[in-house]
Image: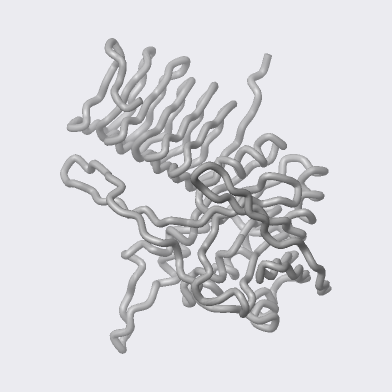
Amino acid sequence: MSAPASGLAQIGKSVFIKGELSGSEDLYLDGQVEGSIALKGNSLTVGPNGQVKASVDAKGVVVQGKLEGNIQASDRVELRKSAIVTGDITTQRIAIEEGASLKGKVDTHRAEK
Amino acid sequence: MKLFRGSSGPETIAEQGSQKLTRRSSGLGELSRMWESAEGLCVLDLGSTSATNIRHFTERGHRIYSEDLLTASTDPELVATDENGVAALDSRKFLADNLVYPAAHFDVVLCWNLPDYLVESLVKPVVGRLWSVLKPGGMLLAFFHTRDAGPDSPCHRFHIIGADTLEMKKIVLRKEARRPPTGTAHATSTTDGFQLQRVFNNRHIENLFRDFASIKFFLARDNIREVLVVR
């Protein structure tokens, strides 16, 4: 899946944001972001054109583009085949497609009941 | 301590449209005994990103770091020209950008076939850095071709599929082109993987790991020498 669903908050590929990004809805990011991204309880998708230099805190994270920064996902992280990730990943579950590139640590944990 | 033991060579499993190679690894078997009985180990995998290996270690409660040093060594910004006009890779810049970890951080380092395929000028500096990031008593596994392997031996990626079993997949390099200003990346071409740079003999290997406390050799039928060293 490369195209975002309708109704999803989107940052298009020509957009550049520097600073703290936070929200309470799912986000599809295909532009450039530097800083930090906090979407607790929601999902972040970095599109194929996305270039992120930020720490990420979300429920789920899907990466198709480039992400430099640590990822904290309370549920799941997916690295698609075009993903290039530099940073540490802490999550419950992780799925990595063949071709994805990761430079960093993977630490999985079970959710506390 | 040095031991010479035989271990099985590769087996070929033909699947629809592709061949998968597996090989038994005595070195991996020894390491497996360690990580099956321990908790919370810190492991460094120096091959290309392997979902299989990441799953193998995270399912056992260990932390795994992934860093593809061979691909990192192809960065064109590493090329420097000396006073004689000879181009060489800048090992200081390479180590400034790669293998940046606290001292004595890792329990296990999986080098796979890295020393055989890494450019000459980077091999000793990389091994020196690996010594420093390994914990005392930490272990490093590396594979070296023997002379019989031949100069065109393909570079493989190793995936852990059993306690002492590896799946081998030939590495194909993917070249990306970026189209400014949007930065869109495309996989434009693929090339054969890395070239075998040299064949180490036993003395070369011992010299390479001379700062380590012990070294163990395992010989295999597939012209691979497995080496397990302890810091």
Residue at the (57%, 65%) spot, across then down: B129
Residue at the (37%, 53%) spot, across then down: B174
| Left or right: B226 as drawn, with respect to B94 | right
Q: Position of residue B80 (x, y in %)?
A: 33, 74
Towards the viewer: B21 or B45: B21
Give the answer, above or below, for where B62 lies relative to A1: below
Residue at the (55%, 71%) spot, across then down: B116
Q: Position of residue A2 (x, y in %)?
A: 32, 27
Q: Residue furthest bottom?
A: B84
Residue at the (40%, 56%) spot, across then down: B173
Quadrant in the picture for residue A30: top left
Quadrant in the picture for residue A1: top left
What colour scheme does the image use?
A: one colour
Q: Position of residue A102 (x, y in %)?
A: 47, 44
Can residue B35 be seen? yes
Q: Position of residue A28 (x, y in %)?
A: 32, 23
Towards the viewer: A87 or B119: B119
Instruction: Please give the count of numbered marks on the rendered protein.
Output: 0
Give the answer, above or below, for where B44 lies relative to A16: below
Q: Quadrant of the C terminus of chain B?
A: bottom right
| Left or right: B70 as drawn, with respect to B83 | right
Q: Residue furthest top?
A: A7
Quadrant in the picture for residue B74: bottom left
Can residue B101 be seen? no
Q: Quadrant of the N terminus of chain B?
A: bottom right
Give the answer, above or below, for where B187 lies relative to B117: above
